[in-house]
Image (cartoon, rainbow, N blue to C red):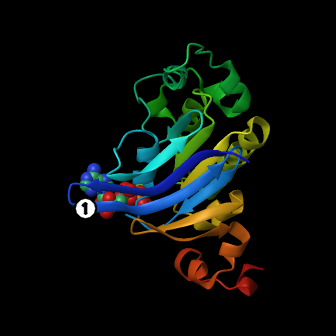
Protein backbone atom coordinates (compact mmCIF):
# COMPACT_ATOMS: atom_id res chain seq x y z
CA UNK A 1 0.00 0.00 0.00
CA UNK A 2 1.10 3.57 -0.58
CA UNK A 3 1.42 6.23 2.08
CA UNK A 4 -0.87 9.24 1.97
CA UNK A 5 1.32 10.82 4.66
CA UNK A 6 4.96 10.12 5.34
CA UNK A 7 6.76 12.08 8.04
CA UNK A 8 10.50 11.60 8.55
CA UNK A 9 12.63 12.91 11.39
CA UNK A 10 10.54 16.05 11.69
CA UNK A 11 11.86 18.79 13.96
CA UNK A 12 9.70 21.86 14.64
CA UNK A 13 10.66 24.72 16.93
CA UNK A 14 8.95 27.76 18.32
CA UNK A 15 11.92 30.08 18.79
CA UNK A 16 14.29 28.20 21.09
CA UNK A 17 11.68 25.69 22.21
CA UNK A 18 11.60 22.35 20.40
CA UNK A 19 8.04 21.09 20.00
CA UNK A 20 8.76 18.14 17.69
CA UNK A 21 12.08 16.40 18.09
CA UNK A 22 12.61 13.93 15.25
CA UNK A 23 9.13 12.56 14.64
CA UNK A 24 8.63 9.86 12.01
CA UNK A 25 5.26 8.37 11.18
CA UNK A 26 3.13 7.25 8.29
CA UNK A 27 -0.50 6.93 7.30
CA UNK A 28 -1.45 4.60 4.48
CA UNK A 29 -4.07 5.44 1.92
CA UNK A 30 -7.53 4.85 3.42
CA UNK A 31 -6.14 4.10 6.87
CA UNK A 32 -7.40 5.47 10.21
CA UNK A 33 -4.53 6.25 12.56
CA UNK A 34 -4.67 7.74 16.05
CA UNK A 35 -2.16 10.12 17.56
CA UNK A 36 -2.46 10.29 21.32
CA UNK A 37 -0.39 11.96 23.97
CA UNK A 38 -0.55 14.39 26.88
CA UNK A 39 -1.05 18.17 26.75
CA UNK A 40 1.87 19.91 25.15
CA UNK A 41 3.24 16.75 23.50
CA UNK A 42 3.25 18.40 20.07
CA UNK A 43 0.14 16.88 18.49
CA UNK A 44 -1.29 20.16 17.19
CA UNK A 45 2.17 21.22 16.08
CA UNK A 46 2.43 18.08 13.98
CA UNK A 47 -0.96 18.64 12.32
CA UNK A 48 -0.23 22.30 11.69
CA UNK A 49 3.09 21.38 10.11
CA UNK A 50 1.69 18.77 7.73
CA UNK A 51 -1.04 21.25 6.79
CA UNK A 52 1.64 23.76 5.83
CA UNK A 53 1.05 26.25 8.63
CA UNK A 54 4.45 25.75 10.27
CA UNK A 55 7.88 25.39 8.72
CA UNK A 56 9.97 22.45 9.98
CA UNK A 57 13.48 23.20 11.24
CA UNK A 58 14.55 19.89 9.72
CA UNK A 59 13.13 16.60 8.51
CA UNK A 60 10.53 16.06 5.83
CA UNK A 61 6.88 15.29 5.27
CA UNK A 62 5.17 14.21 2.11
CA UNK A 63 1.46 14.17 1.41
CA UNK A 64 0.22 12.21 -1.57
CA UNK A 65 -2.88 14.23 -2.45
CA UNK A 66 -4.81 16.73 -0.37
CA UNK A 67 -4.96 17.18 3.38
CA UNK A 68 -7.70 19.01 5.28
CA UNK A 69 -7.75 19.78 8.97
CA UNK A 70 -10.50 19.89 11.57
CA UNK A 71 -8.73 22.36 13.83
CA UNK A 72 -8.57 22.19 17.61
CA UNK A 73 -11.48 24.20 19.00
CA UNK A 74 -13.33 23.97 15.65
CA UNK A 75 -12.72 27.61 14.64
CA UNK A 76 -15.92 28.19 12.71
CA UNK A 77 -16.91 31.61 11.43
CA UNK A 78 -19.48 32.24 14.15
CA UNK A 79 -21.45 34.96 12.35
CA UNK A 80 -21.80 33.01 9.12
CA UNK A 81 -24.32 30.34 8.21
CA UNK A 82 -23.46 26.66 8.32
CA UNK A 83 -23.67 26.51 4.54
CA UNK A 84 -21.24 29.42 4.11
CA UNK A 85 -18.86 27.81 6.59
CA UNK A 86 -19.00 24.62 4.53
CA UNK A 87 -18.34 26.51 1.29
CA UNK A 88 -15.21 28.06 2.80
CA UNK A 89 -13.83 24.53 3.21
CA UNK A 90 -13.83 24.20 -0.57
CA UNK A 91 -11.89 27.37 -1.27
CA UNK A 92 -9.24 25.42 -3.17
CA UNK A 93 -11.83 23.64 -5.31
CA UNK A 94 -13.87 25.02 -8.15
CA UNK A 95 -16.87 22.92 -7.23
CA UNK A 96 -18.35 24.40 -4.06
CA UNK A 97 -21.55 22.41 -3.99
CA UNK A 98 -22.33 21.44 -0.41
CA UNK A 99 -24.68 18.62 -1.49
CA UNK A 100 -21.99 15.93 -1.46
CA UNK A 101 -21.00 16.76 2.09
CA UNK A 102 -24.62 16.90 3.20
CA UNK A 103 -24.97 13.38 1.74
CA UNK A 104 -21.97 12.20 3.71
CA UNK A 105 -23.00 14.02 6.86
CA UNK A 106 -26.83 14.00 6.94
CA UNK A 107 -27.18 15.74 10.32
CA UNK A 108 -25.96 18.93 8.62
CA UNK A 109 -29.00 19.11 6.32
CA UNK A 110 -31.27 20.43 9.04
CA UNK A 111 -28.61 22.89 10.20
CA UNK A 112 -27.54 24.41 6.91
CA UNK A 113 -29.27 27.79 7.31
CA UNK A 114 -28.34 28.26 10.98
CA UNK A 115 -25.76 30.81 12.10
CA UNK A 116 -22.78 28.72 13.14
CA UNK A 117 -22.30 30.52 16.46
CA UNK A 118 -25.77 29.45 17.62
CA UNK A 119 -25.07 25.72 17.28
CA UNK A 120 -24.26 23.38 20.15
CA UNK A 121 -20.69 22.20 20.56
CA UNK A 122 -21.43 18.85 18.94
CA UNK A 123 -23.22 20.48 16.02
CA UNK A 124 -20.32 22.87 15.55
CA UNK A 125 -17.91 19.96 15.48
CA UNK A 126 -20.04 18.34 12.77
CA UNK A 127 -19.80 21.53 10.73
CA UNK A 128 -16.04 21.64 11.29
CA UNK A 129 -15.74 18.06 10.01
CA UNK A 130 -18.10 18.84 7.12
CA UNK A 131 -16.10 21.92 6.21
CA UNK A 132 -12.92 19.84 6.03
CA UNK A 133 -14.69 17.22 3.91
CA UNK A 134 -15.60 19.94 1.40
CA UNK A 135 -11.96 19.93 0.30
CA UNK A 136 -12.40 16.24 -0.65
CA UNK A 137 -9.20 15.40 1.17
CA UNK A 138 -7.17 12.23 0.79
CA UNK A 139 -6.21 12.72 4.42
CA UNK A 140 -8.41 14.25 7.10
CA UNK A 141 -6.41 15.51 10.08
CA UNK A 142 -8.71 15.84 13.09
CA UNK A 143 -7.44 17.73 16.13
CA UNK A 144 -9.39 16.70 19.24
CA UNK A 145 -12.66 15.34 17.93
CA UNK A 146 -14.07 14.92 21.44
CA UNK A 147 -12.97 18.21 23.02
CA UNK A 148 -15.70 19.50 25.33
CA UNK A 149 -18.38 17.17 23.95
CA UNK A 150 -20.69 14.72 25.70
CA UNK A 151 -19.79 11.02 25.18
CA UNK A 152 -22.93 10.31 23.15
CA UNK A 153 -22.22 13.20 20.79
CA UNK A 154 -18.65 12.01 20.40
CA UNK A 155 -19.76 8.45 19.60
CA UNK A 156 -22.06 9.80 16.92
CA UNK A 157 -19.30 11.91 15.36
CA UNK A 158 -16.89 8.99 15.52
CA UNK A 159 -19.39 6.77 13.73
CA UNK A 160 -19.75 9.33 10.96
CA UNK A 161 -16.00 9.62 10.56
CA UNK A 162 -15.64 5.87 10.36
CA UNK A 163 -18.36 5.74 7.73
CA UNK A 164 -16.73 8.39 5.54
CA UNK A 165 -13.46 6.50 5.92
CA UNK A 166 -15.12 3.24 4.85
CA UNK A 167 -17.21 4.62 2.03
CA UNK A 168 -14.78 7.14 0.59
CA UNK A 169 -11.49 5.52 1.50
CA UNK A 170 -10.42 8.80 3.04
CA UNK A 171 -7.52 8.38 5.44
CA UNK A 172 -7.85 9.90 8.90
CA UNK A 173 -5.18 11.03 11.33
CA UNK A 174 -7.03 11.46 14.60
CA UNK A 175 -5.47 13.48 17.40
CA UNK A 176 -7.28 12.68 20.64
CA UNK A 177 -6.97 13.27 24.37
CA UNK A 178 -9.50 10.50 24.81
CA UNK A 179 -7.17 7.55 24.23
CA UNK A 180 -9.91 5.01 24.75
CA UNK A 181 -11.97 6.46 21.91
CA UNK A 182 -8.96 6.89 19.63
CA UNK A 183 -7.76 3.31 20.10
CA UNK A 184 -11.26 1.94 19.53
CA UNK A 185 -11.81 3.95 16.36
CA UNK A 186 -8.37 3.54 14.76
CA UNK A 187 -6.68 0.17 14.18
CA UNK A 188 -3.22 1.72 14.53
CA UNK A 189 -1.83 4.44 16.77
CA UNK A 190 1.18 6.52 17.72
CA UNK A 191 1.88 7.85 21.21
CA UNK A 192 3.60 11.25 21.19
CA UNK A 193 5.34 12.43 24.36
CA UNK A 194 7.32 15.67 24.62
CA UNK A 195 7.90 15.87 20.89
CA UNK A 196 8.89 12.26 20.32
CA UNK A 197 7.07 9.09 19.33
CA UNK A 198 7.20 7.06 22.53
CA UNK A 199 5.21 4.07 21.30
CA UNK A 200 3.44 2.91 18.17
CA UNK A 201 1.66 -0.14 16.90
CA UNK A 202 -1.69 -1.85 16.57
CA UNK A 203 -4.33 -0.32 18.81
CA UNK A 204 -5.28 -3.65 20.38
CA UNK A 205 -1.67 -4.25 21.31
CA UNK A 206 -1.32 -0.70 22.68
CA UNK A 207 -4.55 -1.04 24.69
CA UNK A 208 -2.93 -3.96 26.51
CA UNK A 209 0.44 -2.31 27.02
CA UNK A 210 0.98 -1.51 30.70
CA UNK A 211 2.55 1.86 29.84
CA UNK A 212 -0.45 2.94 27.76
CA UNK A 213 -2.90 1.61 30.32
CA UNK A 214 -1.21 3.45 33.15
CA UNK A 215 -0.78 6.77 31.36
CA UNK A 216 -3.78 6.96 29.03
CA UNK A 217 -6.47 4.50 30.04
CA UNK A 218 -6.70 5.38 33.72
CA UNK A 219 -4.63 2.38 34.71
CA UNK A 220 -7.66 0.10 34.29
CA UNK A 221 -7.02 -3.62 34.19
CA UNK A 222 -8.46 -5.99 31.59
CA UNK A 223 -10.79 -7.42 34.23
CA UNK A 224 -12.14 -4.02 35.19
CA UNK A 225 -13.01 -3.36 31.53
CA UNK A 226 -15.48 -6.23 31.63
N1 LIG B 1 2.75 29.38 18.99
C1 LIG B 1 3.54 28.83 19.91
N2 LIG B 1 4.60 29.50 20.41
C2 LIG B 1 5.42 28.94 21.32
N3 LIG B 1 5.26 27.69 21.80
C3 LIG B 1 4.23 26.98 21.34
C4 LIG B 1 3.31 27.50 20.37
N4 LIG B 1 2.38 26.57 20.11
C5 LIG B 1 2.70 25.52 20.89
N5 LIG B 1 3.80 25.75 21.61
C6 LIG B 1 4.44 24.82 22.55
O1 LIG B 1 4.81 23.65 21.83
C7 LIG B 1 4.55 22.48 22.59
C8 LIG B 1 3.59 21.59 21.84
O2 LIG B 1 2.33 22.23 21.74
P1 LIG B 1 1.09 21.60 20.96
O3 LIG B 1 0.03 22.60 20.94
O4 LIG B 1 1.57 21.06 19.68
O5 LIG B 1 0.73 20.39 21.95
P2 LIG B 1 -0.52 19.40 21.93
O6 LIG B 1 0.01 18.02 22.00
O7 LIG B 1 -1.42 19.74 20.79
O8 LIG B 1 -1.22 19.76 23.32
P3 LIG B 1 -2.78 19.77 23.72
O9 LIG B 1 -3.15 18.34 23.99
O10 LIG B 1 -2.80 20.59 24.96
O11 LIG B 1 -3.56 20.37 22.59
C9 LIG B 1 4.00 22.97 23.93
O12 LIG B 1 5.06 23.03 24.84
C10 LIG B 1 3.49 24.36 23.62
O13 LIG B 1 3.57 25.20 24.75
MG1 LIG C 1 -3.35 20.35 20.66
SS under mark 1: strand
- Considering every residue shown, the one lying at the far left of the view is 16
Task: Report the residue marked by disc 1.
Answer: 17
Q: Position of residue 86 (x, y in %)?
A: 54, 25
Location of the C terminus by quadrant is bottom right
Residue at 34% from the left image edge and 60% from the top image edge = 19
Q: Position of residue 174 (x, y in %)?
A: 58, 52
- Considering every residue shown, the one lying at the far top of the view is 94
Quarter of the displayed picture in which ligand 1 can be seen: bottom left
Between 56 and 51, which is closer to the camera in this rendering?
56
How many callouts does the rendering have? Answer: 1
Q: Tell me where residue 65 sits by quadrant.
A: top right
Is residue 120 visible to the viewer in this orientation of the structure?
no
Is residue 131 visible to the viewer in this orientation of the structure?
yes
Residue at 73% from the left image edge and 83% from the top image edge = 222
Using a 10 Å C-alpha cutoff, classify the residue at mark 1 as few (fewer than 14 neighbours), some (14 to 19) or many (20 or more): few
The answer to whether the residue bearing label 1 lies less than 8 angstroms from the nearest atom of ligand 1 is: yes
**Left or right side of 188 for 128:** left
Q: Tell me where residue 11 sits by quadrant.
A: bottom left
Residue at 34% from the left image edge and 54% from the top image edge = 12
Between 86 and 110, which is closer to the camera in this rendering?
86
**Left or right side of 188 for 148:** left
Between 162 and 194, which is closer to the camera in this rendering?
194
**Left or right side of 192 for 112:** right
Amino acid sequence: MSCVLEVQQLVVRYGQATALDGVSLGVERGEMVALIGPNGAGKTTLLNTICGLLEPASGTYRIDGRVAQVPEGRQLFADMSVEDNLRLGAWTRRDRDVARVLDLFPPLVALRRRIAGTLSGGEQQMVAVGRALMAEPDLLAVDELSLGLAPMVVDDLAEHLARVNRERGMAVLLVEQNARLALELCPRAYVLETGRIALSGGSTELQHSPAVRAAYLGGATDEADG
